[in-house]
Amino acid sequence: MSNSYKWPLILVTLLWAVGSWYVYTCTIKGFCRAEAPDPTPVVTPVPDPEPVVEEPLDLKPIINEEAPEPEPEPEPEPTPEPVAQKQCDPYLWDNIRLGQRNNYGQVQKLEAFLRDYRDEDVPEDGFYGRDDDAAVRRLQVEYASDVLAPWGLSTSTGNVMSTTRKKINELYCAQQ
C-alpha cells in the first residue's frame, strides 16, 4: 500500500471508531445526557416528640408510723447454663445436581459422607452419578420435613441444594 492512501485510511478508521463509541455511549446507553440534579432539597418532616408528663412525687414525711418489716426476698432460682451448640464450618457449600458440571471436590465429600455416615454404597469418584442421586433421594425422604417441605415438595429431587446441603452439614457436624 502506498503512503498516499495510508493517512486518509487511518483518519477514516479513527473517525469511525470515535463515532461508534459516541453512538453506543451517548445514544444507546444515554451516558452523555446532561441532566441537572433537582436543586430543591428533599425535606422529610420529623414529628414532634410527645411531651412527657411526670407525676409529682409525694414528699410528705411519714410521721409517727412504724416502718413495715421488709419481706425476705426469695432466693432466685438457679438458671440452667445454656448448652453451647456445636459450631462447625460448612462441610458442603456448593450445589450438586445430576447431569451438571459439579465441583469435583464437593462431590467427593458428599460421597464420603454418604458412605461413611449413611452406610450408602456409592463410589467415591467425584462424579455425581445415579448411585449418588439415589442415596441423596433416600436422605431427602428420611428428612422430608427439613429438606422438601420448605419448598412444598412431596417427592425427592436428588438435587443437593440449600435445604439438603444444610441438613447434610447439620448431620456431619453432629457426628464430629
Image: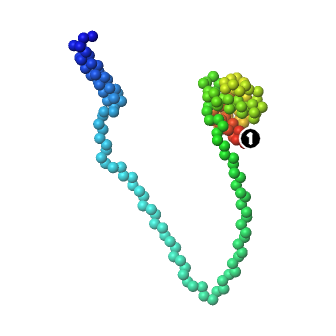
Q: Amino acid at mark 1?
A: Gln
- Sort mark 1 into few (<14), some (14-19) or many (20+) by Cα contacts within 10 Å: few
Q: Does residue 135 appear in this view?
A: yes
**Direction from residue 76 to residue 21 in the image, left or right:** left
78 in relation to 156, above or below? below
- Residue at the (67%, 26%) spot, across then down: 126
Find residue 53 and report its horizontal and vertical position in percent.
49, 70
Q: Dot 1 lies on which element? A: helix
Nearer to me, 5 or 140? 5
**Direction from residue 49 to residue 68 in the image, left or right:** right
The C terminus lies in quadrant: top right
Q: Report the number of discs.
A: 1
Find residue 114 and report its horizontal and vertical position in percent.
73, 31
Q: How was this image coloured?
A: rainbow
The N terminus lies in quadrant: top left
Find residue 31 and report its horizontal and vertical position in percent.
33, 33
- Residue at the (73%, 25%) spot, across then down: 123
